């Protein structure tokens, strides 16, 4: 399945937001390749950098999620966006939201731009060397 196919399987009210988020990710981070895969027993769009998940976009029953490994690995970045997106529910590397009012696209665009300069693949490779 393609990312657009995944989005088309979602309810109409979610399709616009998921399409916008998908476009923000692929437009602002050229290090990734999107595809649909299973993660945490759910199908979702995974955006991988050199084969390693950097972002994930999922729609589950009661909410949608933006998984973002750069905020998981960078507490300052996590704190910055938790403050800028107070209506969304933050976990370690995941932002959960029910609708567009909880995750303004202009802020998400800056988030992905900030994250685009962080190489998850390089970080993991450097960890293995130590």
Image (cartoon, rainbow, N blue to C red):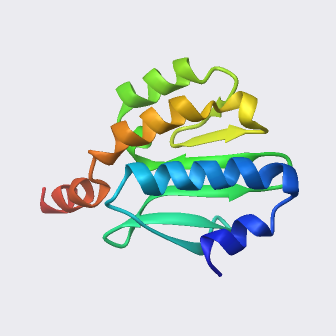
Q: Nearer the viewer, residue 79 or 117?
A: 117
To which quarter of the image does residue 56 belong? bottom right
Q: Residue at x 74, y 50 (%)?
A: 16
| Residue 80 vs residue 109, the one in the foreground | 109
Image check: 114 left or right of 103? left
Above or below, 56 relative to 63:
below
- For this orientation, the residue located farthest to the left is 129
Is 62 positioned to the left or the right of 120 in the image?
Answer: right
Q: On the rendered image, what quadrant is the C terminus found in?
A: bottom left
Q: Taking the image as drawn, is residue 88 in sight?
A: yes
Q: Is residue 42 visible?
A: no
Residue 110, quarter of the rendered image: top left
Quick one: 102 or 90, which is closer to the camera?
102
Does 48 appear above or below 72?
below
Identify whether 99 is placed above or below 32.
Answer: above
Residue 105 placement (x, y as % from top left): 59, 35
- Residue in the picture at 62% in, 49% down: 20
Q: Residue at x 36, y 42 (%)?
A: 115
- The quadrant in which the N terminus is found is bottom right
Residue 77: percent from the left, percent from the top? 39, 29
**Image location (x, y in percent) of residue 71:** 42, 38
């Amino acid at each position: 399945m393609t990312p657009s196919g995944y989005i088309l399987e979602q309810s109409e009210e979610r399709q616009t937001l998921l399409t916008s988020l998908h476009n923000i990710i692929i437009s602002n981070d050229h290090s990734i390749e999107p595809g649909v895969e299973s993660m945490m027993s759910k199908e979702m769009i995974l955006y991988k950098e050199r084969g390693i998940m950097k972002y994930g976009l999922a729609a589950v029953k009661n909410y949608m999620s933006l998984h973002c490994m750069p905020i998981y690995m960078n507490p300052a970045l996590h704190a910055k966006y938790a403050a800028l997106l107070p209506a969304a529910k933050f976990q370690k590397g995941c932002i959960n939201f029910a609708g567009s009012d909880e995750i303004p696209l202009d802020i998400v665009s800056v988030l992905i731009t900030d994250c685009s300069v962080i190489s998850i693949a390089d970080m993991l490779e450097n960890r293995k060397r130590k």
